[in-house]
Image (cartoon, rainbow, N blue to C red):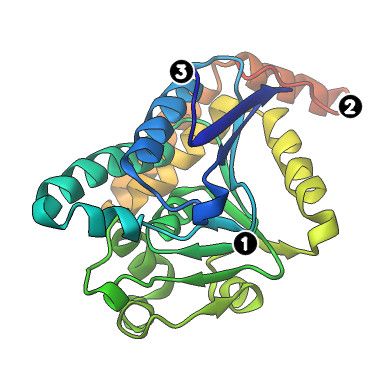
Amino acid sequence: MPYEALIVDIRDHIATLTLNRPDAYNAVNAQMAGECLEAITQVDEDPTVRCVVITGAGRAFSAGGDVKGFHDHLPEIGTHLKHLTHLLHGAVSRIARMPKPVIAAVNGVVAGGGMGLLLACDLAYAVETATLSMAYTRIGANPDGSSTFWLPRLLGVRRALELIYTNRVLSAPEALAWGLLNGIMAPERFLDEVYAVARQLAQGPTLAYARAKKLCYTSLNETLETQMANEAHEITASGKTEDFREGITAFMQKRAPTFQGR
């Protein structure tokens, strides 16, 4: 389907979703949230897609919710926010549950709901000039978009609340040191380096990645013994895949494996 607030490009088993409201710093309105949910569902179900990259057009990844839209809908703001979060949260949930690696390519400013999108991705790389902030309490709002789920787990409650209470702006090097990013790159090398990672993942054992992702996320609520039982179940399933047989065969033949994602 055609999109207006989103650009979808699929090639070489990589789906790139570009948030496309650059004049508004890719602020999330209902249209963008709905298109994100639709596109993420589409690439989730597309068997040719083995890795997903989410980025932004222009100078921002996403500056968060569309504050102008909030102002325009003040008389019915409750209904407006429920509709917006329903769509955004659906997209975020699909990102986190998708059995494919998802990379956030953070090309600039990230704030508010943009933080939720970033945090829900499996990996996050940023241009070295990017900045990250929560920004919610600046307009008298609490966070949404999943950030209160991920931040305490990644940073601990104290640092999570520091970011929320103070709206502290983290530079990309600070966000890397805090564990919110996997790496930072110079602007002229940014996309090349991000897509080098994406190509590696798109050529990898897709089903094994899916099981690893599922295990890591479910481990947050499991005991040691239950988690090890889950690992045993999943590795048994992995052993029945074509990629596992290829990996074992390639190892014995002392060559690089060629995975098909099956």
The crowd level at tag 3 (other Cα within 10 Å; few <14, some 14-19, many 20+) is few
Residue in front for this viewpoint, 185 or 254? 185
Task: Please report the residue visible at 70 percent of the width from the left and 39 percent of the height from the top.
Answer: 198
Task: Please report the residue visible at 50 percent of the width from the left and 51 percent of the height from the top.
Answer: 26
250 to 66, vertically: above or below: above
233 to 180, vertically: above or below: above
Residue that carries the numbered disc 2 in the rendered image: 255
Q: Which mark is residue 30?
A: none
Image quadrant in which you'd find residue 131: bottom right
Image quadrant in which you'd find residue 92: top left
Structural distance between the alpha carbons of marks 1 and 3: 29 Å
The answer to the question of whether label 1 and label 2 lie on touching residues, with beta carbons closer than 8 A, is: no
Q: Amino acid at mark 1?
A: Gly
- Outermost residue toward the right in this view: 254
Viewer-nearest of discs 3 and 2:
3
Residue that carries the numbered disc 1 in the rendered image: 108
Sequence-earlier tag: 3 or 2:
3
Sequence-earlier tag: 1 or 2:
1
The reply, left or right, for residue 260 in relation to residue 145 is right
